[in-house]
Amino acid sequence: MKFFDVGFLHPTNTKNLYRLSFLIIVLYTISLFYNLHLAPLYSEEPRRALVALEMLLNNNFVVTTILKQTFYDHPPLWNIVLAGSIKLFGYNTFALRFPSAFSLLLTGILAFYMGRKYINTKFGILSAFYYLVCADLYFYFSVTAEIDIFYSLLVTLSIFSIFHFYEQKQFYRLFGAAYFFITLAFLTKGFASFAFIIITLGSYLLYKKDLKRLFSWPHIFCALLSAAAVYFYFYIYGSYENLGRYISEMWGLTQQRTLLSDRFDGIVKHLFMFPLNFLGVIFPSTLFLLFIWKKEQIQNIKAQPYLVFLVIAFIANFLVYWVSPGARIRYTYMFFPMVVTVLSYPLFLRLKETNWKHKAYHTLFKVIMAIAALACMVIPFVGYFSILPHLKYTMPLFGLLLVLTLVFHHKTIGYTKHLFVITFIVLCRLVFDHVALPMKALTSSGAAHKSYAEDIYKIIGEDETPLYVFTQEDLRTHIQTPFKLYETASYLEMSRKSIVMNTDQCELPGYYIFNKQNLEGREPLYEFTISKVDLALVKID
């Protein structure tokens, strides 16, 4: 007999389950922000950081720059959000990463609200939790300063607004909210954003046999307002910079992701691999496919208008990415809450069952929990982790927490059992924060760039003398100065609160970072190497 089949954690004890859920969301929130600042900037983060920092330092929130040169890329909203976070939390990596992690939390709250309103509270909690712990989001992208989770939040708000207000027959609010959020999405990532509202409105109104709504005054009025906002943005941008080149560059970024951007063999590979990759990155919800392959389960989904809408919105929009070889999984994050919600429903209806599917699912997690607990006990004795001496005290505690979670998972049933699966994943993220992020700070290749910036800052100090990067190439070329120089430059701008400026002249007095091949006899104050390119800091009086 299971000890907790009845009592304070029985699935019928709703009040205690809500208390447990609250505790989980508190731990989850802590896990999102714990040690978030430690890992060095990497991948696209330094470029995002430079744009946001230079917005603040230039006091220009319309035209984006990198190293003082105009950077024709996405519209500025995400960079404005990053700049606001920097103003709030200071010039540091936590400020750069906070908006992405917070956007994930907000999207989870939105998924919970919709699930609670249109199914019930328990379903809203469970489906939102499983969305929040999707592997790719939780363990990778929420730890970065990248744009995609924030962008997906805006698109999700737009799409969910369509169903929410259609159900209430409030059409001005429907089109107003949908176009408001998609206009913000355009101001984040450009033209492709409007495809979401066109496809979703068209497919859902076609399903509802209400296409005439597209020609109604509420739709026309709100669409015109959105168009006016876009025009106003371009008008303002054109008063600062070359508008034609900017629109051309932005459109080029959109076109790269389309069917026209690859050869036939690339298209075939993408058609096969993309849906498989998508299913992989929503783990553990991928496993819910076990519970959906029955006609009865399909009928249960069809009986819920909210789930039908999610299926229509997902299929109609996902097809665009499926046939676009330039698409990446991170471009589809707005579909995660839709898919996880739909996949969770058949599971939710069968929580009381104990057939082989449920046993297989929970047995898999029991094995993973046991391995994770053992790993926590072993890590203090592995030489690779000896550079973090505190682990010998803390990792056994994490191991005990994981063992305790395993015991509760084993002893409980139904809905409660899944809450302990979520608890386990949250604890794994806390272990990741506690071990992997400090290790990255000390051992990753990006750690060197922070060290270079610190060394250069010690030489320059608080001196207001300008710092230049000398190169005669385009921002996107990176031959004389490697792309990874952005990492060092972003740390320098954070520490000096002054822009590192790109230049092809070296006539003005100041500090210069040169490719050593271009030194022409100048005496270096400091030498360093990035991506096998030897660089040097010199001072020109």
Image (tube, rainbow, N blue to C red):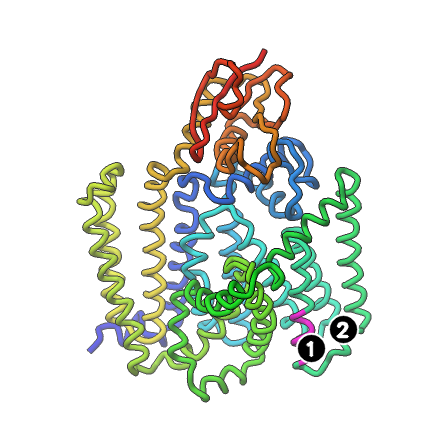
At a point 57% along the width and 39% down the height, the residue shown is 477
Label tally: 2
Range drawn in magenta? 199-206
User: What secondary structure is the magenta-colored segment mainly?
Assistant: helix
Q: Position of residue 238 (x, y in %)?
A: 78, 42
Res. 93 visible in picture: yes
**Viewer-nearest residue: 238 or 181:** 238
Reading the image, the residue beneath label 1 is 205
Q: CA distance from mark 1 to mark 2?
A: 8 Å
Reading the image, the residue beneath label 2 is 214
Q: Quadrant of the N terminus?
A: bottom left
At a point 36% along the width and 63% down the height, the residue shown is 422
Q: Which is nearer the N-term, disc 1 or disc 2?
A: 1
The picture quadrant where one finds residue 372 is bottom left
Answer with left or right where residue 445 lies relative to residue 391.
right
Check disc 2 and give the amino acid type.
Leu
Is residue 531 positioned above or below 18 on the image?
above
